[in-house]
Image (spheres, grey):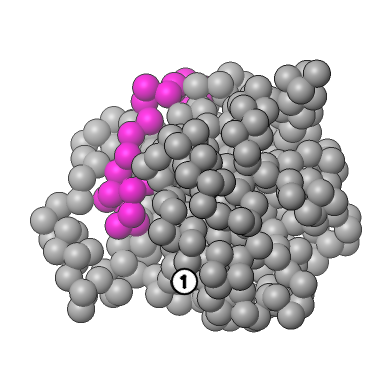
């Protein structure tokens, strides 16, 4: 089943949850234009702020939206965030970076759908066995935490071996890209990078301008920030910082005893670094984006970006 039919929306598109970028203005604009959207729970510092964001969107529309939840031990707010999302009955939860078993167990009785980020078949089979409603196939064209297989390889592999819907994440910039993913068997697509420089996002003007000034060739993978591979714009600061974890970071990430605490520390430090860069003009710029940055040419309202993508998709199908 495609996600437009699963969720009752016009197009099989999720505006991807983007750390520090997604906000209620963006979500509401997406929902008003025939697609769904999600935001990371971690974009809100307190439970009260998370609840207020959900209430604001629900007051605006009854259209379905989701929340991204980091489900591993690097997120100390995981349990409380899950409890809030279940209590408020969000339409779906996107799980990342951990075991979604508890999320699925709590959501299924409430009718809350659970979509799980995966980068390979082994993990996809695990979450399918746990009862996930769909997998989000994060390929090597994704922004943020990217996978290692191409869109074609990953969609094909999961479609041939899993019975639940496969949502493609990475490399969608035009309607033709979405049509191609759907032709490969995807149930829809999670799209992020082309929305980063939208009018509604609260990131700094410098970050938005960087989305226009830099291109695909400027996207690099770094393991310095979260302990996991992350795609960022190769600014002068990133070049100075380097993209490979140093020996101490490597030991911390690979020692079983230290790994849990190191992940928390590195993720916290990395999030703080990205946060400073996202909202302030600083030399220390670490800006997340995927290869689809190549197709960002101007700062535009969310509605315009969505309408362009959906009209291109309609044209590609006809």
Q: Give left or right: position of 295 versus 306.
A: left
Task: Say whether residue 205 is visible.
Answer: no
Q: Residues within 10 Å of mark 1 (few under 14, many from 20)?
A: some
Residue 166 at x, y = what percent?
60, 48
**Rendered image quadrant of residue 50:** bottom right
Q: Quick check: 283 above or below 74?
A: above
Helix, strand or loop under label 1: loop
> Which region of the structure is painted magenta?
210-230
Q: Is residue 80 above or below residue 245?
A: below
The residue under the point 65% across, 80% down is 106
Q: Residue 154: image x %, image y %?
A: 47, 42
**Residue, disc 1:** 99
On whether residue 208 falls in the magenta region, the answer is no
| x and y percentages locating residue 47 in the rendered image | 63, 75
Looking at the image, residue 8 sits to the left or right of residue 143; the answer is right
- Asked whether, in this view, residue 277 is left or right of residue 100, the answer is left
Left of 136 or right of it: where is 119? left
């Amino acid at each position: 089943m495609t996600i437009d039919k699963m969720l009752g929306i016009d197009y099989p598109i999720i505006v991807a949850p983007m750390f520090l970028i997604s906000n209620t203005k963006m979500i509401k604009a997406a929902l008003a234009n025939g697609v769904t959207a999600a935001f990371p729970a971690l974009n809100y510092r307190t439970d009260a702020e998370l609840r207020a964001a959900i209430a604001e969107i629900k007051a605006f529309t009854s259209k379905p939206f989701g929340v991204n939840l980091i489900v591993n031990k690097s997120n100390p707010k995981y349990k409380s965030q899950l409890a809030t999302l279940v209590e408020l009955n969000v339409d779906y939860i996107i799980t990342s970076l951990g075991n979604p078993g508890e999320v699925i167990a709590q959501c299924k009785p409430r009718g809350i759908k659970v979509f799980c980020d995966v980068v390979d078949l082994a993990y996809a089979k695990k979450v399918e066995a746990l009862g996930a409603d769909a997998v989000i196939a994060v390929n090597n064209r994704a922004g943020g935490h990217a996978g290692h297989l191409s869109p074609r390889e990953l969609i094909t592999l999961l479609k041939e071996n899993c019975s639940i819907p496969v949502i493609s994440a990475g490399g969608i910039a035009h309607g033709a890209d979405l049509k191609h993913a759907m032709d490969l068997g995807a149930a829809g697509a999670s799209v992020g990078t082309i929305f980063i420089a939208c009018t509604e996002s609260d990131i700094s003007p410098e970050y938005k301008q960087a989305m226009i000034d830099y291109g695909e060739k400027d996207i690099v993978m770094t393991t310095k920030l979260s302990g996991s591979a992350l795609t960022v714009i190769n600014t002068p600061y990133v070049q100075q910082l380097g993209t490979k974890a140093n020996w101490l970071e490597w030991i911390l990430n690979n020692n079983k005893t230290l790994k849990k605490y190191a992940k928390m520390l590195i993720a916290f430090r990395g999030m703080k670094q990205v946060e400073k860069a996202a909202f302030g003009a600083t030399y220390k710029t670490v800006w997340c984006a995927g290869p689809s940055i190549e197709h960002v040419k101007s700062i535009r309202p969310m509605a315009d970006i969505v309408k362009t993508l959906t009209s291109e998709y309609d044209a590609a199908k006809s």
